[in-house]
Image (cartoon, rainbow, N blue to C red):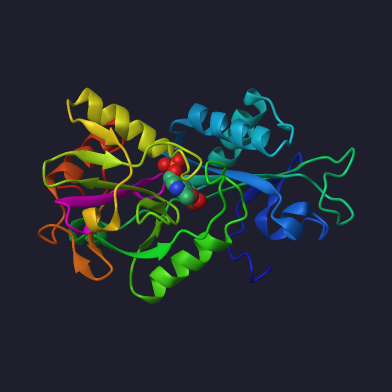
Amino acid sequence: MNPIHPDDSLCYLNGEYLPLSGARIPVLDRGFIFGDGVYEVVPVYHKRAFRLEPHLDRLQRSLAQVRIDNPHTRDEWRAIIDRLVRSSTPVDLAVYVQVTRGVARRDFAFPRNVTPTVFAMASALTRPSAAQRDAGLRTISVPDARWLRCDIKSVSLLPNILAKQAARESGAYEAWFVDKDGNVTEGGSTNAWIVTKDGELVTRQLSNSILGGITRRSLVKLAADAQIKVVERPFSLEEARGAREAFLTSTTSFVTPITKIDGKPVGTGKPGAVAARLRELYYGYMGSPEPGAA
Ligand code: PDD
């Protein structure tokens, strides 16, 4: 077996289902050469894709923004994801879907008559552990050095990679990007939230500066339904440091408290009640019991 792919699960590549270890793309694929492609990560709980339609909507939007024709209909996407889920052993999965502009001689402008490359795989969902949830995560702050279209789920992720690596090297889970005005945009792969001293639940408003997270969207609605007021506005790093609570959201991180920013405690330094309540609401919405829940 190829040691690069010890996981030999089934994947989808350009119309075929084959073991991940056997999947190959040509080196001139524009995803490899330019990072010219977009992706999605769809959560699957107990073998059921969760919020699949908003994920497929966002994929469609990302593709349209970079002017790649969607290579599949909704039904085809559903069938691909379904087949990968059925062939996987773990019941909780993250299905990764990537579409690149395709294979062509290297030239920056779009090639003519090129067929997009489509790849999808299902991996076991690795979520923050019960210990991480109970203790809270640490985040560091880094300047937001990304481009001005962070609303597109592009596979060009170098600034995110560098930020997440800096986090890992300092023992943190996440890195929060800070814009030139000193405001937090989002995390390297998560959306950022705080609960202010006045009990206001705050997350940055949708714009080109952040990815419109599907988990973020679910939570805005769940909070509103539970009469918890959400204010969508920028917040500074200082405000976050002085907040009562902080937490992050994503498909793979759910709703997880942050108890330290740049080594300094947020609020009491312990996970807060609002994040715990929202997490509970989110698990209720998922219809899936939280692993390790009391
Ligand atoms: N990341 N912001 C960024 C930059 C992200 O990459 C992600 C998702 C999110 C949260 O979006 P959602 O709630 O739809 O997962 C916010 C995925 C999980 C990833 O790249 O692996």
Of 81 and 106, the residue lying toward us:
106
Of 96 and 7, the residue lying toward us:
96
- Which percent across, then down, holds residue 105? 90, 55
- At a point 71% along the width and 50% down the height, the residue shown is 36
The image shows residue 52, relative to residue 185, as above or below, that is above
Residue 151 magenta-drawn? no
Taking the image as shown, residue 131 lies to the left or right of residue 184, namely: left
Taking the image as shown, residue 137 lies to the left or right of residue 98, namely: left
- At a point 18% along the width and 57% down the height, the residue shown is 134
The image shows residue 169, relative to residue 41, as above or below, that is below
The residue range painted magenta reads 241-255
Of 185 and 227, the residue lying toward us:
185
How many numbered callouts? 0
Q: Examine the image and state in which quarter residue 264 appears.
A: bottom left
- Which percent across, then down, holds residue 183? 35, 52
- At a point 44% along the width and 30% down the height, the residue shown is 51
Taking the image as shown, residue 63 lies to the left or right of residue 94, namely: right
Q: Residue furthest toward the front?
A: 181
- Asked whether residue 117 appears in the rendered view, the answer is yes
- Which percent across, then down, holds residue 167? 39, 69
- At a point 43% along the width and 33% down the height, the residue shown is 50
Residue 254 magenta-drawn? yes
Instruction: Give the position of the N terminus as an image quadrant.
Output: bottom right
